[in-house]
Amino acid sequence: NEIELGSYDCYMMKEIEEQPAVMRKIVSAYTTENGQVAIDERIISSLLASDRIYIIACGTSWHAGLIGKNLLEKLAEIPTEVHLSSEFGYHTPLLSEKPFFIYLSQSGETADSRQVLVQTNKWAYPSLTITNVLGSTLSREASFTLPLYAGPEIAVASTKAYTAQIAVLSILASVVGRAKKIMAAETFDVASELSLAAHQMDTLLTKQGKYQDLVEKMLKQTRNAFFIGRGADYSVSLEGALKLKEISYLQCEGFASGELKHGTIALIEERTPVFALITGQSTHLQTRSNLKEVESRGAATCAIVMEDLAQEGDDIILPKVHELFTPLMSVLPTQLIAYYTALMKGNNVDKPRNLAKSVTVE
Ligand code: G6P
């Protein structure tokens, strides 16, 4: 491959470790000469004229879209829906009067997403493709495009494209929010918060010593694993579970932790692995009590917790970032857990069975 592996054994670890640099690259690429982050005026005015955003994506990009919804609603106050391309295409929901479509796609070639774009183009709705590949089909066919600047992503399991999508969406949301004079956007310095996140990601990524033991202890003897959380932690739980299933072949699921008692807790047995993501100021106590509930039924647990919410005995502590950016931190341990599990199992980390990097059939 033309992309050098350097000292790495596989692309996935290289790409995981590139994430802080990608954050910095995005900040500098979206900063203009006057030192402010900026987005093409035409994109901003099209968004300002719309009454609802529809994010269309698949897989990991869909998970990034879930975080994007939160950013767009909080910073720009535009109602945002996130849809799976393959669902939206054939079961189109009732649309608002002035929809704006955002296509999130690392490759820009995903057929399921393209199929929706062809349709929304027929309806002449404005669209923006956020992609890692400028000149890709989705990038050419949408009204507008914004690059991710993540550099080529080779490993099938996506890592740096996910965090890049969140970063670019946060810049978009904050520029729109500022144009609308939304207080939350005016008091949010997206460039410096992203730079801080990059720094904290570096700190977290230098501490990989514990993961090998952790996965040996929690995931060696199991056929399944669960991730739980609330709000953004729930969205990241879905991504953490997807990453682990993709390369470890364990059956993994992400659950809203409040829903456990409504059914899922029946699955908990002696030593069932449960990873809890705890970064939300308003829900950390609730998730902690959910963690206790599964522990008391025998689960093997691992708490991944934001620094200021940490307690004695928590397994992984996330260095502090702005609350809107906790997903940039909490996703890293889930990527590392997936990586070290695949390694332990002797699986092909970069090329998992049955999967393709870019799926160009519906
Ligand atoms: C494939 C890949 C996934 C990816 C999804 C969407 O299934 O294996 O890792 O998340 O496609 O890809 P895209 O390029 O549209 O982001």
Image (cartoon, rainbow, N blue to C red):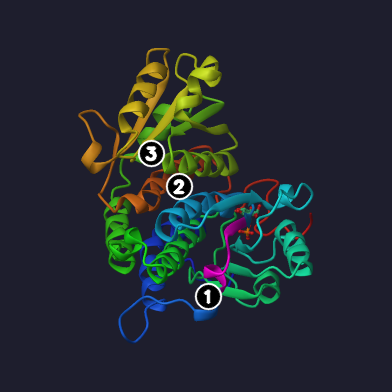
* Placement of 116 over or under 323, stated as above or below: below
Q: Residues within 10 Å of mark 3 (few under 14, many from 20)?
A: some
Q: Secondary structure at mark 3?
A: helix
Residue at image point 29% right, 33% down: 315
Query: Label 1 crowding class (10 Å Cα cut-off): few <14, some 14-19, many 20+?
Result: few
Say the numbered circle drawn on residue 45. Answer: 1
Label 2 and label 3: CA atoms lie apart by 13 Å
- Does residue 79 belong to the magenta stretch? no
Up-down: is 37 above or below 5?
Answer: below
Q: Which residues are magenta?
A: 46-55
The disc labelled 1 sits on which kind of residue? Ser
Apparent side of residue 100 relative to residue 28 in the rendered image (left or right): right
Q: Quadrant of the N terminus?
A: bottom right
Which residue is tagged 2? 335
User: Which badge, 3 or 1, is on the more N-terminal residue?
Assistant: 1
| SS assignment at label 1 | helix
Quarter occupied by residue 313 = top left
Residue 247 in view, yes or no: yes
Residue 159 position (above or below residue 217): below
Label 2, label 1: how far apart the Cα atoms are:
37 Å
Badge number at residue 212: 3
Residue farthest along the front direction in this orientation: 97
Residue 184: percent from the left, percent from the top?
Answer: 33, 58
Amino acid residing under circle 2: Gln
